[in-house]
Amino acid sequence: MKKKLNIGLDFLIDKLTNSIENVISGDSFATEISLITISDLKKINKKNHWNFDWIFEFKQPQRDIYKLTIVNNQTVVQGLISLEIKQDHVYMHLLESAPFNKGKSKLYAGVPGNLVAFACKLSFQRGQEGNVSFLSKTQLIQHYIESLGADHIGGRIMIIQTIAALKLINKYFPNEK
């Protein structure tokens, strides 16, 4: 199996919302996060303007891919995250908003924040105190410090610790305490 380089995550936190928010109307939509299926992945590819090889990611046995969808509309994937449960934290391998949720003409804001909050929530569920780590692109280190409350611990390694994790979870999952 071919080995991929760890180039670092480069998602932008466009806005911390209570769910995801329609950019034009400002309406918020409740979301669900669930494991992706192989049938979902048939539409998630470079031909459909996704940046990453999610099939490769899906085939990694230690990783789980989660999809973000709007409640009652699970056929339209708003974003994806690849997570690995480590001994003392959750590691984020990849995170990507759907092509229609990127750039100036995006449809929904809040997708990346929602997915990161889910990673923090999963860490708490696994008894890891909300701790999440990831590699950042160098130019985004300060962005993650400011937007997520992440700590830069050296090189390109970022961690989200308990207090910052709780803030994200309380923002995106206020009814799940």
Image (spheres, rainbow, N blue to C red):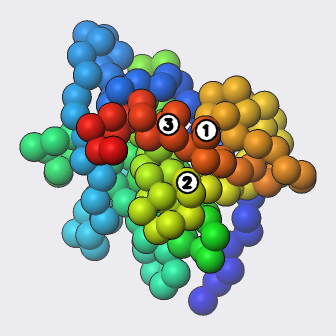
Dots 1, 2 in contact, CB < 8 A: yes
Q: Residues within 10 Å of mark 2 (few under 14, many from 20)?
A: many
Rendered location of residue 110, percent (x, y): 42, 30
Pointer 1 or 2: first along the chain = 2
Of residues 74 and 161, which is closer to you in this image?
A: 161
* Residue 164: mark in rendering: 1
C-alpha span from label 1 to label 2: 8 Å
Of residues 111 and 38, which is closer to you in this image?
A: 111
Of residues 56 and 78, which is closer to you in this image?
A: 78
Indicate whether 21 appears above or below 37: above
* Residue 168: mark in rendering: 3
**Residue at the limit of the structure toward the right, as seen here:** 154
Identify the residue at horizontal 74%, vertical 49% (top origin): 158
Q: Residues within 10 Å of mark 1 (few under 14, many from 20)?
A: many
Label 1 is placed on what type of residue? Answer: Ala
Q: Residues within 10 Å of mark 3 (few under 14, many from 20)?
A: many
Rendered location of residue 103, percent (x, y): 51, 26
Residue 17 appears left or right of 3: left
Indicate whether 61 appears above or below 161: below
Of residues 99 and 174, which is closer to you in this image?
A: 174
Q: Which residue is mark 2?
A: 130
C-alpha span from label 3 to label 1: 6 Å
Secondary element type, mark 1: helix
Identify the residue at horizontal 85%, vertical 50% (top origin): 153
